[in-house]
Amino acid sequence: LEDRSLVTCTVNETDKRSFLIGLTPSGETLAHRIYQMLKELEEEILGAFSPKDQKSALWLISAITTVTNERRPTT
């Protein structure tokens, strides 16, 4: 990503063992485009369902995410 000028990578001055990663303007533009595409896809998919079914689907996705995160090994 750094070679494609999407992120910057600099040594953390307060802890030289670590790096600070940030988006470049090009990276921010790409991130925004990706977000918009995902938002449109979400609207297209959920638009095929009734509001009640949308709410149920979003609840289920949230529940799956919670269970998955709880089972993730800690480091």
Image: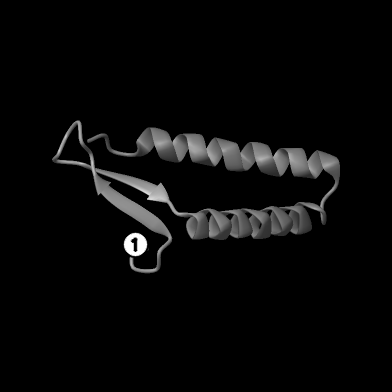
Number of numbered discs overlaid on the protein picture: 1
Find the residue positioned furthest to the bottom: 4
User: 9 left or right of 38?
Assistant: left
Disc 1 packing (10 Å; few <14; some 14–19; many ≥20): few
Image location of residue 26, percent across then percent down? 51, 60
Quadrant where the N terminus lies? bottom left
User: For this rendering, which residue is in front, 2 or 72?
Assistant: 2
User: 44 left or right of 73?
Assistant: right
Quadrant where the C terminus lies? top left
User: Helix or strand or loop: what does disc 1 sit on?
Assistant: loop
Residue type, label 1: Glu
Find the residue positioned furthest to the left: 17
- Which residue is drawn at the image coordinates 73% and 57% (left, top)? 40
Query: Is 14 placed above or below 50 here?
Result: above
Image location of residue 21, percent across then percent down? 34, 47
User: For this rendering, which residue is in front, 28 or 57?
Assistant: 28
Image location of residue 2, percent across then percent down? 34, 62
User: 53 left or right of 60?
Assistant: right
Q: What residue would you read off at disc 1?
A: 2
Image location of residue 27, percent across then percent down? 49, 57
- Which residue is drawn at the image coordinates 76% and 53% (left, top)? 43
Q: Quadrant of residue 20?
A: top left
Q: Quadrant of residue 6?
A: bottom left
- Which residue is drawn at the image coordinates 84% and 41% (left, top)? 51
Q: How is the image coloured?
A: one colour
